[in-house]
Image (cartoon, rainbow, N blue to C red):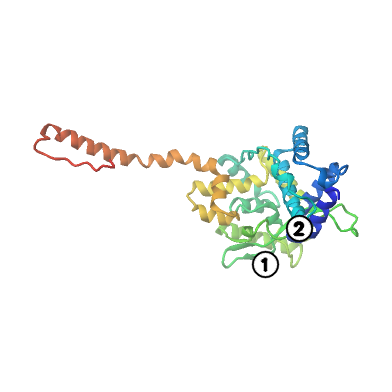
Amino acid sequence: MKLSEWLRFWLDTYEKSSIKLTTYANYDGYIRNYFQKFDDKDITQIFSDDYQDFFDGILEYGLSAKTVRNMIIFLRKALKKAVVEDVIPSNPALDIELPKYESPEIKILSHDQQTKLIKVSYFYRYGVFVRLTLCTGIRLGELLGLQWNDIDFDRREMRIRRTLHRCKNYDPTEKASTSIFLDPPKTKNSKRTIPLLNHAVEDLKSWKLKQSREVTNAKFVVTGINGKFLDPKTFKDYYNRMLDRCDIHGITFHALRHTFATNALERGMDKKTLSEILGHYSVAFTLDTYAHVVDSFKRKNMDLMEDVYECSQGQNMLILFFLPFQKKFIVSIPENR
């Protein structure tokens, strides 16, 4: 059996039903674009050194360390099943060294940029959703997948139940190479309910009234003038127009999510609450992602401890005062001081 044959069989037999379509598309791309290069050998004749040389080569060629790491993890998982099914005697991918990967620096809007963007957003059709993202931290796919039955105006809540994205089309009856798909949220933690600020509720009510003048009974919250859902690329184009108007550069739409998180931490939001609002799988992940923000608070919070030292100084002065009379007075100092 060839490596690509096993990977294809494993993907379609064991994985396809349990992974998102976007993940399937990534795995499919790994097989077609990279792992077919091993098909001059039988799968049992490919060893860890062969794989290591291959991954080192595509790293030097310019493929990102993050993508290579994902490919190695994918290969390890597939070959683990190959061992179980007696296709190969052992898993050579376990010995492949994962390339070092540092998460890129998180970019956010400065306070001045944020103020400027919010002001400009009122002059654009989809500006309401820039403001909504800045006060909820939702992802673009979650925003575009919102339907009106996900919004509870009375309880001032927004439920995240699906994501909308464009992905490779695997339906042979479709002519287009890509199509728009609705998927469940990114992870089980991404399925969540987010409280809405009063301003966000009023914003959404105004948008719904405007939308109703264009089309009746629109299903999706974010729509074009035809009442249909919006393509992610189309929305990004509108967003970039707003940035150009503000003379802001290098800030992706996802940076609004990071800006929300930073604002929340700066205002003292409980970290567990923030983690749940963002849809992260753990508080530790949230703290790790925004460690740079937490670090910036260390000086501010340490300054609050000055009174402890001042109390200590007061006790020291008292001790010094009694030193000349130490034969007459006994001053006890706790051991931990």
Quarter assignment of residue 15? bottom right
SS assignment at label 1:
helix
Q: Is residue 215 visible?
A: yes
Mark 2, residue position = 15
Count neighbours of disc 1 (C-alpha within 10 A) and say few if under 14, some if 14 to 19, many if 20 or more: few
174 to the left or right of 97: right
- Amino acid type of the residue tagged 1 in the rendering: Asn
Q: Nearer the viewer, mark 2 or mark 1?
A: 2
Count neighbours of disc 2 (C-alpha within 10 A) and say few if under 14, some if 14 to 19, many if 20 or more: some
At 12% from the left and 31% from the top, the residue drawn is 324
Residue closest to the far front: 89
SS assignment at label 2:
helix
Name the disc covering residue 92, or none. none
Q: Nearer the viewer, residue 334 or 241?
A: 334
- Amino acid type of the residue tagged 2 in the rendering: Glu
Q: Nearer the viewer, residue 76 or 175?
A: 76
Q: Nearer the viewer, residue 40 or 177?
A: 40
How many labels were placed on the picture? 2
131 to the left or right of 13: left
At 70% from the left and 38% from the top, the residue drawn is 65
Mark 1, residue position = 149
Estimate the x, y position of residue 14 in percent, counting from the top left: 77, 59
Estimate the x, y position of residue 31 in percent, counting from the top left: 82, 47
Q: Is residue 241 visible?
A: no
Sequence order check, earlier mark of 2 and 1: 2
